[in-house]
Image (cartoon, rainbow, N blue to C red):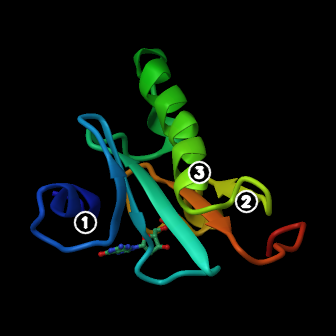
């Protein structure tokens, strides 16, 4: 099981922001901004590069869930960044696809 599957199974605790039968959103344990939430599909896709055409609806759902998180955590006006790290050069550390939502501070561009 991945760490995020264990969170979904309540074997590891997390501060959950949103959940339904397909996805869950919870606060990152090592936040890089005042708001740093991860959105994770309950069905494991290891990373974006290993997604398939049949994952289209679930991938769309992950992006649509960013709006729910932004509404819940008051990011709609101030703005927020959505990030997916894929593979070593991007710093991916958990092999279970996840979308980062970062906000509540100005974020520099380009990212490091
Ligand atoms: P990435 O580098 O894109 O693979 O991001 C993985 C993120 O997962 C990283 O920001 C830290 C977070 N993380 C790792 N383990 C846990 C955990 O047990 N609980 C929570 N809430 N977040 C975790």
Q: Is residue 66 left or right of residue 38?
A: right
Would residue 75 be seen by someone viewing this image from the given angle? yes
Say which residue appears at 62% left-offset and 81% top-offset: 34
Q: Earlier in the sequence, mark 2 or mark 3?
A: 3
Where residue 58 is drawn, which disc sits there? none
On screen, residue 12 above or below 81: below
Q: Please state, as top left, top right, bottom left or bottom right, where the C terminus lies in the image.
A: bottom right
Say which residue appears at 43% left-offset and 70% top-offset: 27
Q: Give the crowd class for mark 2: few <14, some 14-19, many >=20 residues within 10 Å.
A: many
Extreme residue toward the right, this view: 109
Label 2, label 1: how many angstroms apart (C-alpha)? 25 Å
Label 2, label 3: how many angstroms apart (C-alpha)? 11 Å
Q: Is residue 8 left or right of residue 47?
A: left
Which residue bears the numbered disc 1?
A: 3
On screen, residue 29 above or below 37: below
Q: Is residue 50 left or right of residue 66?
A: left
Q: Position of residue 1 (x, y in %)?
A: 15, 57
* Image-quarter location of ligand 1: bottom left
Label 3 beta carbon within 8 A of ligand 1? no
Label 1 beta carbon within 8 A of ligand 1? yes
Which residue bears the numbered disc 3?
A: 71
Q: Earlier in the sequence, mark 2 or mark 1?
A: 1
Q: Position of residue 8 (x, y in %)?
A: 20, 55
Quarter assignment of residue 2 = bottom left
Q: Position of residue 72 (x, y in %)?
A: 52, 56
Q: Mark 3 falls on what kind of element?
A: helix
Q: Earlier in the sequence, mark 1 or mark 3?
A: 1
Which residue bears the numbered disc 2?
A: 80
Q: Give the crowd class for mark 1: few <14, some 14-19, many >=20 residues within 10 Å.
A: few
Say which residue appears at 28% left-offset and 39% top-offset: 20
| Of the two numbered discs 1 and 3 in the rendering, the one whose residue sits closer to the viewer | 3
Q: Give the crowd class for mark 3: few <14, some 14-19, many >=20 residues within 10 Å.
A: few
């Amino acid at each position: 099981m991945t760490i995020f599957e264990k969170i979904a199974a309540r074997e590891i605790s997390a501060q959950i922001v949103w959940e339904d039968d397909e996805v869950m959103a919870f606060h990152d344990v090592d936040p890089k901004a005042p708001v740093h939430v991860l959105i994770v599909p309950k069905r494991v896709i290891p990373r974006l590069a290993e997604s398939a055409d049949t994952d289209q609806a679930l991938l769309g759902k992950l992006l649509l869930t960013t709006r729910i998180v932004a509404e819940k955590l008051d990011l709609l006006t101030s703005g927020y960044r959505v990030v997916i790290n894929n593979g070593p050069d991007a710093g991916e550390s958990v092999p279970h696809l996840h979308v980062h939502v970062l906000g509540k501070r100005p974020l520099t561009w380009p990212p490091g």
